[in-house]
Amino acid sequence: MNKMGTITGFTFKNKVKTKSFMVTTIVLALLITIGLNIPYFISLYNGDTNGGATGNNPVNIGLLTTEQQDVAQKLEDFSTAQGNQAYRFIVSGDKDENALKADAKAGLIDGYLKLESVAGQQFPQSVLYSTDDISPQIVTSIETALQSVKLDMVVKDVLTEEQKALITTPVKLTEQSLSTDKEEAGAGAEESMSPINYIVVYLLIILLFTSTMMTGNMIASEITAEKSSRVMEILITSVSPLSQMFGKIIGIFMVGMLQIGIFGAVIAGNILLPHNRAVLSDFNLSVNDINIAVIVYGLIFYVLGYFLYAVLFAAIGSMVSRTEELGQAVLPITMLSLVSFYIAIFSISTPNILLLKIASFVPFTSPTAILVRIGAGVAPTWEILASLAILVVSIFVFGWLAAKIYRTGVLMYGKRPTFKELFKAMKAYKI
């Protein structure tokens, strides 16, 4: 165990100090930072930092009040009562349309709203003129104000304020499934996950896939490099093959966890920036809505999924004598990982399909498949525990098999051994 600890520490320190690790980590951290701040950069480029406002100032909309003065006044009152900071109405007084156009061109206002009377209609036709494009959020807010004023003018004093508010409140439809799985998952669970949890699950799937592939190839390439350079023949005299294999797996696992910790800190730091919190609010996204179970189970399944694939990569790496052959040798494991990735990504909007349910119990696909179902709240507790149990048992089974292959393969040079030769050699060693 002391020797395995030495191998683990050496592998971790050796990989962390390499230029490739430092450069990759820094570049990915910068890309994550840029990606998370793209909406803010776009708003700066457009001169928009407040949902369509210029700078920190709201969008100023002039009201042409040469006619329909009562409607214009109600619009201004409604906007003031809402306390909307993204836009505000400015009553033009006695100014005509030409004067408002001149004000818009001079930059005094961003546009003006013209209320045109239409024969046979009680409410005027509304036309918004602007010098630049006004954000859809502000246009929607103005439409809401017009709708409220229209309702107020049509019903007049027939309805109370509470009744008017009830009429203008949108109706929200909640879906409930009658399936047995849904009832077991818990009352009130939804088939479609919230937007913020959708993003979290999506990122976790990508992270699990990329991290597993990177660290797995790192394990295989290091073992193959030691074998091709004949360093393995020296190491094998001092440290047992099993201590070598598991020492490398744990050491590179620590490297992967360090990298994930750095990326997690970068993501959290960027999301907590004031301007990014404002962007999340604009899209009705809140960090408080994140399902903690998704994060916890995501970490657990990441660790277990890593060890399952890691032992397979180590076994394949021990069978290859030259690094040039490694890419072709690990192709089957890469394909398995790709299948797991695509099943989860393409089923993220339909978490209750049969394919995803079956994949949740297959050890090679369960780390991503069950994560989608947990994020959507449709995975019963027994399914999660069963998936974990199958994954743990699979790690022990494939770990035992990989250990026998590794013990045999590290000292077999030349062409890759056939399954018959490998099986015969494996029978000679007891673990």
Image: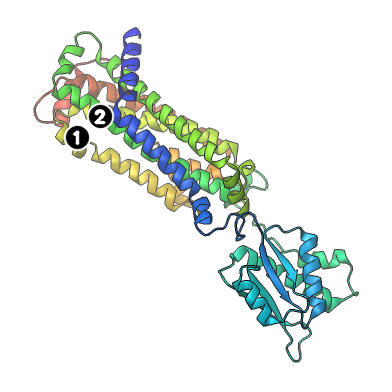
Rendered image quadrant of residue 30: top left
- The numbered disc on residue 143 is none
Name which residue lies at 65% across and 68% down: 108
On the question of residue 267 being in view, the answer is yes
Residue drawn 52% across and 34% down? 297
Disc 2 secondary structure class: helix
Q: Is residue 376 visible?
A: no
- Which residue was labeled with disc 1? 326
- Kind of residue at disc 1: Leu
Position of residue 353 measured from the top left corner of the image (x, y, whole percent): 48, 52
Residue 382 location in percent, x, y? 56, 36
Residue 69 rendering spot, x and y as whole percentages: 80, 79
Q: Are marks 2 and 1 in contact (CB under 8 Å)?
A: yes
Whole-angstrom CA distance, mark 2 to mark 1, is: 8 Å
The residue singled out by tag 2 in the image is 220
SS for callout 1: helix
